[in-house]
Image (cartoon, rainbow, N blue to C red):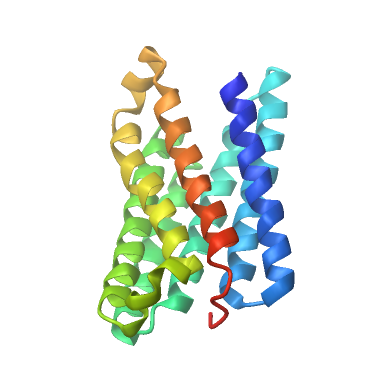
């Protein structure tokens, strides 16, 4: 319970910080990140409230993962410069949407939707990091909030794929703390990127 509270505190703190940094620089990257973090914080707070009342949060997460996927996709669609690479976003976006719609008829496929989405987001992040590595910006990567946010995203999205792959076994073994640790690490990277790398204003 204490770990859940700490996660909510971190998520809410990251969301609040993103609002402050966005109001200071008003870039598209920060705006989209602010929407993502704000929606995540609100969803988690409300879902925890529903669970505390004995309700199910599946419906909220079903909608959340769809919106979150497209927000993150748009973030990387805007910061990746290679037009050829951008084409994969539209192709994968259509596939993800069809998969998401299928969940209305087969709820048991929900963990696989998360796996698919996390895999796609990981690909987007790797495309961005590769582009960054080959550009002059790599010399100042420590000052790039998009770099630190991407590292945090990659740690969570890629590392959680095995978790959701064996989702049924994780429930029986009560191993959700692994996912909680990944969420904490992701938010710490995001907070670091926003506080220590806020001078990048080009996106």
Residue at image point 39% right, 78% down: 80
The N terminus: image quadrant: top right
Residue at image point 29% right, 64% down: 126
Front-most of 193 and 76?
Answer: 193
Q: Kindly indicate the quadrant of the structure image that contains residue 165.
A: top left
Is residue 154 at all visible to an observer of this figure?
yes
Q: Is residue 53 left or right of residue 57?
A: right
Horizontal and vertical percent position of residue 58 = 57, 33
Residue at image point 66% right, 29% down: 48
Residue at image point 58% right, 63% down: 33
Front-most of 79 and 51?
Answer: 79
Q: Is residue 110 left or right of residue 35?
A: left
Front-most of 99 and 149?
Answer: 149
Horizontal and vertical percent position of residue 35 = 65, 60
Horizontal and vertical percent position of residue 7 = 59, 34
Q: Is residue 75 above or below residue 39?
A: below
Q: Is residue 201 above or below residue 158?
A: below
Is residue 57 at all visible to an observer of this figure?
no
Horizontal and vertical percent position of residue 131 = 30, 76
Total marks shown come to: 0
């Amino acid at each position: 319970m204490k770990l859940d509270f700490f996660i909510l505190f971190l998520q809410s703190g990251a969301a609040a910080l993103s609002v402050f940094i966005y109001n200071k620089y008003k870039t598209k990257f920060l705006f989209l990140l602010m929407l993502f973090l704000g929606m995540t914080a609100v969803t988690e707070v409300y879902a925890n409230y529903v669970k505390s009342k004995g309700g199910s949060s599946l419906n909220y997460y079903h909608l959340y993962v769809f919106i979150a996927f497209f927000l993150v996709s748009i973030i990387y669609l805007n910061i990746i410069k290679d037009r050829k690479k951008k084409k994969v976003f539209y192709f994968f976006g259509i596939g993800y949407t069809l998969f998401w719609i299928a969940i209305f008829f087969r709820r048991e496929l929900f963990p696989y939707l998360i796996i698919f989405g996390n895999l796609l987001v990981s690909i987007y992040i790797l495309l961005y990091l590769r582009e960054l590595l080959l550009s002059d910006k790599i010399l100042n990567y420590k000052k790039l909030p998009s770099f630190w946010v991407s590292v945090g995203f990659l740690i969570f999205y890629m590392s959680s794929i095995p978790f959701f792959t064996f989702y049924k076994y994780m429930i029986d073994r009560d191993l959700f703390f692994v996912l909680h640790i990944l969420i904490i690490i992701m938010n710490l990277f995001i907070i670091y990127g926003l506080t220590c790398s806020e001078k990048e204003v080009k996106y």
